[in-house]
């Protein structure tokens, strides 16, 4: 299941040396706004990088150069290159690379900002961009699991199914029990068993109506009959 694209309509904020003042929209004052089309949440683990398609569109009176970068990200998390919307163009669509360095120890939800700036007129605006940093998968020598896809999108109170794939090696032929470890009891899953002759099974995930409407990073655990565990990350994007 792919991340849903959201459109952010952003009104510029005037950045003065003495503080931040709101740009007026009344009278003859210009109305500044940009629109960003991008995934609201992207999931990956340290050491990985993935493409992110983004469209930046000018709206209303702003006709200057606009540059968009990733702000408020922890060290080691980058979104490159920066997006440049020339003064002569109304919109630009480009594919960026979101990367997390291998030595990043942060896991869980990281809230960053897609920051659009017009340096000439000292205006800036931002939209929230969630990065779900999943823990690295931890396989056993003879079996491993993966959630495919690694991100599930649903509304609070809904349920969904996520395929869980197991890879066996070194003669391992036993069953495994799959469970979900989530940071809240409002998100849960029924344990399931992947039998020796099976390689894929669907994990049923349930959410309460009262679940906070934010992405969360959970862990899928596969346990063998002798108690050994293999794990992988799963983002549950709750709206």
Image (spheres, grey):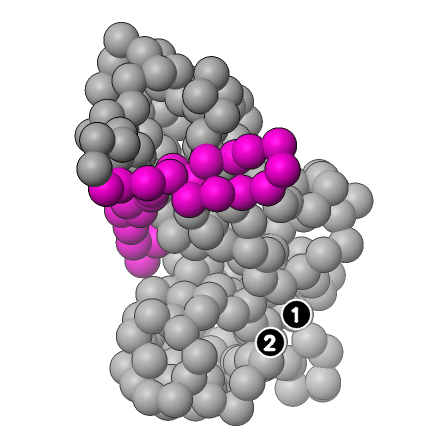
Can you give x and y, in whole percent of width and height, for residue 20 in the image?
54, 43
Q: Is residue 219 above or below residue 211?
A: above
Q: Is residue 42 above or below residue 49?
A: below
What is the magenta range? Answer: 1-26
Label disc, if present, on residue 230 of the rendered structure: 1
Residue at the top extreme of this rendering? 88
- Quadrant of the image containing the C terminus: bottom left
Task: Kindly identify the residue that appears in the image at 65 percent across and 86 percent down.
Answer: 225
Task: Kindly identify the residue that appears in the image at 50 percent across and 20 percent down.
Answer: 119
Q: Is residue 41 above or below residue 162?
A: above
Task: Kindly identify the residue that appears in the image at 38 percent across and 52 percent down.
Answer: 40
Q: Is residue 200 visible?
A: no
- Of the residues under marks 2 and 1, which one precedes in the sequence? 2
- Number of numbered discs on residues: 2
Q: Is residue 25 visible?
A: yes
Q: Residues within 10 Å of mark 1 (few under 14, many from 20)?
A: many
Q: Is residue 12 above or below residue 234?
A: above
> How far separated are the C-alphas under marks 2 and 1?
6 Å
Q: Is residue 208 left or right of residue 108?
A: left
Q: Can you tell which quarter of the image residue 110 is in?
A: bottom right
Can you give x and y, in whole percent of width and height, for residue 52 in the image?
42, 36
Q: Residues within 10 Å of mark 2 (few under 14, many from 20)?
A: many
- Quadrant of the image containing the N terminus: bottom left
Q: Secondary structure at mark 1?
A: strand
Q: Is residue 132 left or right of residue 65?
A: right
Label disc, if present, on residue 221 of the rendered structure: 2
Magenta-drawn stretch contains 22: yes
Can you give x and y, in whole percent of width and height, for residue 89 in the image?
25, 14
In this rendered view, identify the residue nearer to me: 33 or 102: 33
Q: Are marks 2 and 1 in contact (CB under 8 Å)?
A: yes
Can you give x and y, in whole percent of width and height, for residue 139 in the image?
68, 62
In this rendered view, identify the residue nearer to me: 46 or 220: 46
């Amino acid at each position: 299941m792919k991340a849903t694209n959201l459109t952010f309509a952003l009104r510029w904020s005037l950045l003065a040396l003495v503080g931040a003042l709101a740009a007026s929209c009344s009278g003859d004052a210009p109305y500044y706004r940009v629109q960003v089309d991008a995934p609201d949440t992207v999931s990956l683990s340290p050491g990985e990088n993935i493409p992110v398609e983004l469209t930046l569109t000018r709206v209303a009176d702003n006709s200057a150069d606009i540059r968009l970068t990733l702000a408020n990200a922890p060290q080691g998390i980058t979104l490159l290159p920066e997006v440049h919307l020339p003064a002569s163009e109304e919109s630009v669509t480009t594919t960026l690379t979101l990367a997390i360095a291998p030595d990043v120890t942060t896991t869980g939800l990281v809230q960053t900002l897609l920051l659009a700036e017009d340096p000439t007129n000292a205006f800036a605006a931002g939209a929230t961009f969630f990065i779900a940093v999943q823990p690295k998968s931890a396989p056993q020598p003879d079996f491993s699991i993966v959630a495919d896809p690694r991100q599930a999108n649903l509304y609070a109170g809904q349920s969904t199914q996520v395929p869980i794939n197991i890879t066996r090696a070194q003669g391992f032929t036993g069953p495994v029990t799959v469970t979900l470890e989530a940071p809240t009891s409002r998100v849960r899953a029924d344990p399931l068993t992947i039998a020796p002759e099976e390689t894929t099974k669907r994990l049923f995930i349930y959410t309460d109506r009262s679940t906070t409407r934010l992405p969360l990073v959970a862990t899928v655990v596969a346990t063998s009959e002798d108690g050994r565990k293999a794990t992988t990350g799963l983002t549950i994007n709750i709206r």
